[in-house]
Image (cartoon, helix red, strand yellow):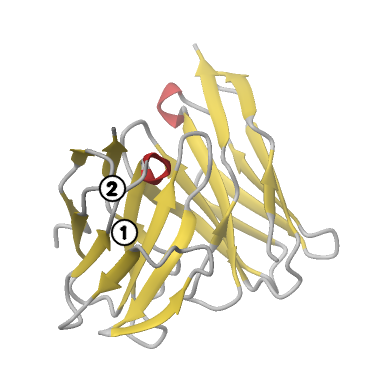
Amino acid sequence: GEDVEQSLFLSVREGDSSVINCTYTDSSSTYLYWYKQEPGAGLQLLTYIFSNMDMKQDQRLTVLLNKKDKHLSLRIADTQTGDSAIYFCAESVTNAGKSTFGDGTTLTVKP
Amino acid sequence: DTGVSQDPRHKITKRGQNVTFRCDPISEHNRLYWYRQTLGQGPEFLTYFQNEAQLEKSRLLSDRFSAERPKGSFSTLEIQRTEQGDSAMYLCASSPLTGQGVLNYGYTFGSGTRLTVV
């Protein structure tokens, strides 16, 4: 079945760049997403990328996709303390269909 | 638009009791999803609806779990004869279908209902 793997923790200094990595197993994955979850809250969609794209940039966020290696990364430029949260990678085969989520990467930003 | 609303935010119940949660999606979203999240893990798919039709249900979902979306608007998730292993955050999400004139993909999540079974 589908599986999505992420490293559990990342710690950076304020102002540095953060890179969160994700690997997935389903070669049929067409849509790949990054969500952010703050304490006590639901998940917030940050960005998404289609499998026919290599890169997508959205303000401070850059998503890179290596489809051959089934590797996805999220780069956050100029990381702020407000970026501290859990970041989830997710994939789905169809838009608006079922998604499979990783277990999340906890990002800690130190002042 | 107030986003996706879930009620209640917290529920504590005794083992063996039945519980029901409600989700109100974004009004123009056709699809509604239920996920379960336990501490330290990502959301796990339970089921989803397109309008009032339940399109998919997880094989992992016990027959103690049932979900409805009778009029294609709000949805309820019922757990019968609760067990301690049911303790989790139950997340509802909604999304539009392609072609509804939106360019966003992915879900809009509610804040969840935290269930504690004692």
B40 or B30: which is nearer to us? Answer: B40
Q: Secondary structure at mark 1?
A: strand
Residue at mark 1 shares a chain with residue at mark 2: yes
Q: Name the residue at 38% across, 39% down.
A: B84
Q: Quadrant of residue B65?
A: bottom left
Residue farthest top in this picture: A111
Which numbered disc covers residue B112? 2
Amino acid, disc 1: Cys
Q: Residue B112's spot in the image, x, y percent?
A: 28, 47
Determine the chain carrying the residue at label 1. Answer: B
Q: Residue B50's spot in the image, x, y percent?
A: 33, 83
Residue behind mark 1? B92
Which numbered disc covers residue A30? none
Residue B25 in view: no
Amino acid, disc 2: Gly
Q: Quadrant of residue A8?
A: top right
User: Badge 2 local density, few (<14 within 10 Å), some, or many (20+)?
Assistant: many
Badges 1 and 2: C-beta atoms under 8 Å apart?
yes
User: Badge 1 local density, few (<14 within 10 Å), some, or many (20+)?
Assistant: many
Q: Name the residue at 31% across, 69% down.
A: B66
Q: Secondary structure at mark 2?
A: loop
Q: Residue B14's spot in the image, x, y percent?
A: 23, 38
